[in-house]
């Protein structure tokens, strides 16, 4: 999920989005991946952290951070900016999926898919589709993208039945979608007040 969401973080010119919601969606994707990998388990009394092999670098980093701060809840980790969009872009570069190019004296960067990665780029982008209507709402990543406005449109919540179904396969997803939607509506209300 993290790579699928990361594939949506750059525009056609390779510029990294500055969206706060996109950053939070990316961290939600990492948390969802940790649940899928078995690194986070929902116990009767608390969330158990398990060491598992073959995690992506940012997932490893978040898991280590979580072990150091066991009193924080999972929504706090989705909100906490210890892992940023620049970190996500760095992971894409480290994995050999993106190349980083300097702009404006190296103060800004843009990214392109590496040679030979066009097929993977298509697969990652296809997993989240090009629009809300084209997205497969049976999958987690498109719903995180929809709620975060990663399609270039206003954030929009998935239907309740979709969220409930996703929760059957990944117990954390309903909470993460609810968190992102509340955050989106708060940001929207704050912007309206400032206007």
Image (cartoon, grey):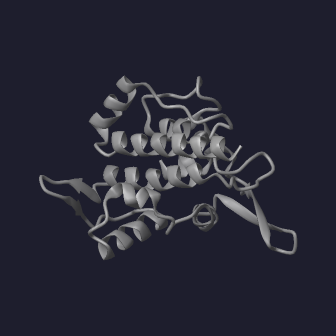
Q: Residue at x 47, y 56 (%)?
A: 27
The number of callouts visible is 0
Residue 173 vs 62, above or below: the answer is: above
* Along the line of sight, the residue nearer the viewer: 7 or 65: 65
Q: Which residue, as the protein is rendered here, is positioned at the far left?
A: 44
- Residue 38 is situated, as x and y percent measured from the top left of the image, at 28, 55
* Along the line of sight, the residue nearer the viewer: 87 or 23: 23
Residue 191 vs 162, above or below: the answer is: below
Q: Which residue, as the protein is rendered here, is positioned at the far right?
A: 104
* Along the line of sight, the residue nearer the viewer: 46 or 169: 46
The answer to whether 71 appears left or right of 82 in the picture is left
Q: Which residue is drawn at 37% across and 31% down?
A: 163
Residue 55 vs 129, above or below: the answer is: below
The answer to whether 15 appears left or right of 50 in the picture is right
- Residue 92 is situated, as x and y percent measured from the top left of the image, at 61, 61
Residue 67, by quadrant, is: bottom left
Q: Residue at x 34, y 57 (%)?
A: 74
Q: Which residue is drawn at 23% across and 55% down?
A: 41
Residue 35 vs 136, above or below: the answer is: below
- Residue 87 is situated, as x and y percent measured from the top left of the image, at 58, 66
Query: Considering the image in quadrants, where does the C terminus appear?
Result: top right
- Residue 14 is situated, as x and y percent measured from the top left of the image, at 76, 53
């Amino acid at each position: 999920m993290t790579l699928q969401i990361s594939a949506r973080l750059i525009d056609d010119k390779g510029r990294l989005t500055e969206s706060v919601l996109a950053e939070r969606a990316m961290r939600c994707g990492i948390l969802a991946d940790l649940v899928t990998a078995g690194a986070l388990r929902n116990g009767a009394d608390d969330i158990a952290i398990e060491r598992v092999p073959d995690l992506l670098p940012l997932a490893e980093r978040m898991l280590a951070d979580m072990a150091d701060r066991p009193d924080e809840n999972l929504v706090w980790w989705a909100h906490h900016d210890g892992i940023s969009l620049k970190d996500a872009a760095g992971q894409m570069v480290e994995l050999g999926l993106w190349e980083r190019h300097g702009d404006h004296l190296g103060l800004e960067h843009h990214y392109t898919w590496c040679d030979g990665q066009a097929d993977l780029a298509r697969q990652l982008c296809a997993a989240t589709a090009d629009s809300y209507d084209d997205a497969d709402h049976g999958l987690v990543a498109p719903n995180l993208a929809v709620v975060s406005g990663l399609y270039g449109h206003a954030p929009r919540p998935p239907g309740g039945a979709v969220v409930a179904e996703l929760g059957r396969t990944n117990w954390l997803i309903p909470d993460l979608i609810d968190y992102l939607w509340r955050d989106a509506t708060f940001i929207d209300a704050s912007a309206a007040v400032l206007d």
